[in-house]
Image: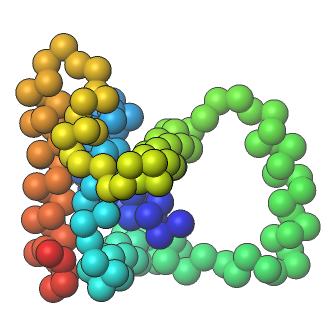
Amino acid sequence: SRYLYFYKHAVDLLIEHGIVCTGEVPLPEVSTAISHLWQELSEESRDSILQYCSQRDFLMDPKAACPEPACTEGSVRDSGGNSEEASGSSVSTPEEVMFEDAFDVAAGFLDRSKAQGMSSQSSAFASCTSENPEDHQRLYLQVTDFLKHLFFTNTQFCQ
């Protein structure tokens, strides 16, 4: 869940700063770049970045940083009515699609690392189907460079 929180904030920041448009979010280069960045971070760096994201949430929307406890009686009882609505809908929201992409990348990385050890960035690019590999490489580098710069500027622990 820490990775998904990081992934969501990374995508939000990329869109907010014009590094990617919403149509580019599902591209494998975006997910792969975010995943590789997460893997490179030490635990201390991850904690620092997640704290930055949490503070950013609070500044943007105080309610988002203070979710209600999951075990309140009202929320358990109310969730039954909402599940019918959710199961009746076959349309995924952009946020759901984004989390599915993040989960797929994380699951794929775990499968590959079990089978062959840590995967390299070049093997990730080999799986990209593209007419112009330079565009994919450029997008990957834009995403990683921007996020590294942003997180380094806003946290003292990022590598």
**Picture residue at 47% right of the left edge, 70% below the top:** 2
User: Is 114 displayed left or right of 81 in the figure?
Assistant: left
Q: Nearer the viewer, residue 113 or 73?
A: 113
Residue 3, position in %: x, y? 44, 64
Q: Quadrant of residue 39?
A: bottom left
Note whether 11 is above or below 44 in the view shown: above
Image label count: 0
Residue 147, position in %: x, y? 19, 60
**Picture residue at 88% right of the left edge, 53% below the top:** 81
**Picture residue at 8% right of the left edge, 27% below the top:** 134
User: Is 47 displayed left or right of 149 in the figure?
Assistant: right
Among all residues in the image, which is located at the extreme top? 131
User: Is 85 displayed left or right of 22 in the figure?
Assistant: right
Residue 142, position in %: x, y? 12, 46
Q: Nearer the viewer, residue 44 or 67?
A: 44
In this rendering, does residue 127 appear at all?
A: yes
Q: Nearer the viewer, residue 159 or 55?
A: 159
| The C terminus sits in image quarter | bottom left
Note whether 93 is above or below 55 in the view shown: above
**Picture residue at 60% right of the left edge, 76% below the top:** 67
